[in-house]
Image (spheres, helix red, strand yellow):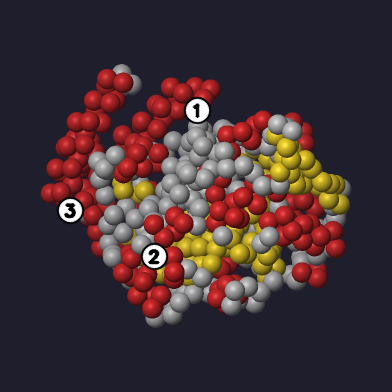
């Protein structure tokens, strides 16, 4: 019953889309279990760029794809992605796409509230994607949200929407001094979305557990990154879901004892978007050089925003590996560092006279920490043609070994470019390696 959860180890944008696409060649099912269309997973195939926000990356390889109850769904966006896939010759049907009826739905009022709240916060804004993700999760926790199962049932949806709009409109008019939503402007298009998605509804926990019992391979695709986890991340500058590996179980109904392991995806350096602390952040020309290096650059797939860039942060990655139980690592964008003679790597922090190599649980103090760097020698040669570990320059191999030494986790895969074949495997089968205990 091989089952692996893939998680981002940093602040997202680690290259999970490519890695999940590569690993899904072995998988039978690929599962999204948290987040929403604030995710942007990018895959390059023979020069063709695919960006997925809600659908699991496994759709590209025609795998059975699942969206679990932990995901918040903008039905308009999901239907657009389904149509975009059809335009690329990928037909999604109730036989290969399965949606949990317990997914909470993003409505226009969630998006408006998200935007208004960010504007009101001003300089203290979180830096959200303004996709309505946070307000939708807030309704979920407040036990007043509307779920996909209700959306697909016109009678239940009508009653739920009428009830909830009273509270929503009061909030908009009384607090934000904004115009209310009418029932009709939401109900009419959304009941059509519900009808279109109804055939895809499935018992996701039953489906996945039965697949595991048959010995089928399941790949859980995380969105965002561990340092954006609402509990474990750089709060309050986080997303609104559990992005760490535990979220795969709660967001899909798949039990922990059936999981074979966690693969952490980590960039060879560090990036983040939005606000919040970033100990190894670079500025000015140095940041621009790192941001613009490599074939893709560092710009958000969802928002297009330039990403903040900095050197590899060992203490933070070590904590994220620990929190996820990541036995293996996939290191991405190693090729980007080929342009540098010397590569600084954060190995410890100093805070109030103490030095430590594991980031503290209270990540709010990161802005007060002094970073301790060790300089690693660069390799100054194009490595995009490497296909084995031995093809890499010795300095690049040493850099990867340093990551292993810092984190205590084994590098099992290295990405040295955006395309599928620009990948180095340390293990013939990643699923097999996890089942065997690496």
Please, is residue 175 above or below residue 12 in the view? Answer: above
Q: Nearer the viewer, residue 217 or 384?
A: 217
**Residue 394 visible in image:** yes
Q: Quadrant of the C terminus?
A: bottom right
Left or right, residue 225 beside residue 380? left
Q: Badge 1, how many Cα within 10 Å: few under 14, some, many 20+?
A: some
Which residue is the site of mark 2? 254
Is residue 50 visible in the rendered structure shown here? no
* Residue 66 image-quadrant placement: bottom left
Locate residue 188, reporting x and y percent.
20, 42
- Few, some or many residues within 10 Å of mark 3 (<14, 14–19, 20+): some
Quarter residue 332 falls in: bottom right
Choose the circle earlier in sequence order: 2 or 1.
1
Q: Residue at x 67, y 30 (%)?
A: 368
**Coordinates of residue 273 in the picture (x, y in percent):** 58, 38
Residue bearing mark 1 = 125
Image point (68%, 60%), residue name: 408
How many neighbours does mark 2 have within 10 angstroms: few (below 14), some (14-19), or many (20 or more)? many
Residue under pointer 3: 153
Secondary structure of residue under mark 3: loop
Task: Look at 71% across and 52% down and name the residue there.
Answer: 268
Between 235 and 167, the one lying in front of the other is 235
């Amino acid at each position: 019953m091989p089952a692996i959860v893939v998680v981002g180890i940093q602040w997202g944008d680690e290259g999970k889309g490519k890695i999940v696409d590569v690993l899904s060649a072995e998988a039978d099912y690929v599962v999204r279990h948290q987040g929403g269309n604030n995710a942007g997973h990018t895959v390059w195939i023979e020069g063709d760029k695919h960006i997925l926000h809600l659908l699991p990356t496994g759709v590209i390889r025609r795998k059975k794809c699942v969206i679990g109850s932990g995901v918040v769904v903008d039905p308009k966006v999901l239907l657009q992605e389904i149509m975009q896939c059809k335009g690329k010759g990928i037909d999604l049907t109730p036989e290969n796409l399965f949606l949990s009826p317990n997914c909470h739905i993003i409505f226009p009022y969630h998006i408006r509230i998200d935007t208004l709240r960010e504007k009101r916060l001003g300089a203290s804004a979180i830096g959200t994607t303004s996709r309505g993700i946070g307000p939708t999760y807030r309704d979920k926790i407040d036990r007043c949200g509307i779920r996909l199962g209700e959306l697909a049932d016109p009678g239940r949806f009508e009653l739920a929407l009428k009830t909830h709009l009273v509270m929503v409109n009061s909030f908009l008019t009384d607090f934000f001094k904004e115009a209310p939503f009418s029932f009709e402007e939401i109900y009419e298009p959304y009941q059509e979305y519900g009808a279109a998605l109804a055939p895809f509804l499935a018992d996701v926990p039953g489906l996945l557990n039965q697949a595991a019992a048959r010995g089928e391979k399941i790949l859980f695709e995380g969105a965002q990154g561990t340092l954006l986890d609402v509990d474990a991340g750089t709060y309050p500058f986080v997303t609104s879901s559990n992005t760490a590996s535990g979220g795969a179980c709660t967001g899909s109904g798949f039990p922990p004892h059936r999981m074979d392991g966690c693969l952490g995806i980590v960039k060879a350096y560090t990036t983040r978007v939005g606000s919040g602390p970033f100990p190894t952040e670079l500025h000015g020309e140095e940041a621009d050089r790192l941001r613009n290096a490599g074939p893709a650059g560092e710009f958000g797939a969802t928002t297009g925003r330039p990403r903040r860039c900095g050197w590899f942060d060992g203490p933070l990655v070590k904590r994220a590996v620990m929190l996820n139980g990541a036995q293996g690592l996939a290191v991405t964008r190693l090729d980007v560092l080929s342009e540098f003679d010397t590569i600084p790597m954060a190995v410890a922090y100093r805070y109030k006279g103490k030095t430590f190599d594991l980031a503290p649980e209270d990540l709010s103090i990161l802005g007060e920490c002094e970073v301790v760097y060790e300089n690693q020698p660069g390799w100054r040669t194009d490595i995009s043609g490497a296909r084995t570990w031995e093809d890499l320059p010795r300095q690049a191999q040493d850099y990867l070994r340093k990551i292993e030494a810092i984190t205590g986790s084994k590098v099992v895969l290295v990405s040295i470019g955006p395309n599928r074949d620009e990948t180095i495997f340390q293990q013939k089968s990643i699923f097999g390696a996890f089942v065997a205990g690496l």
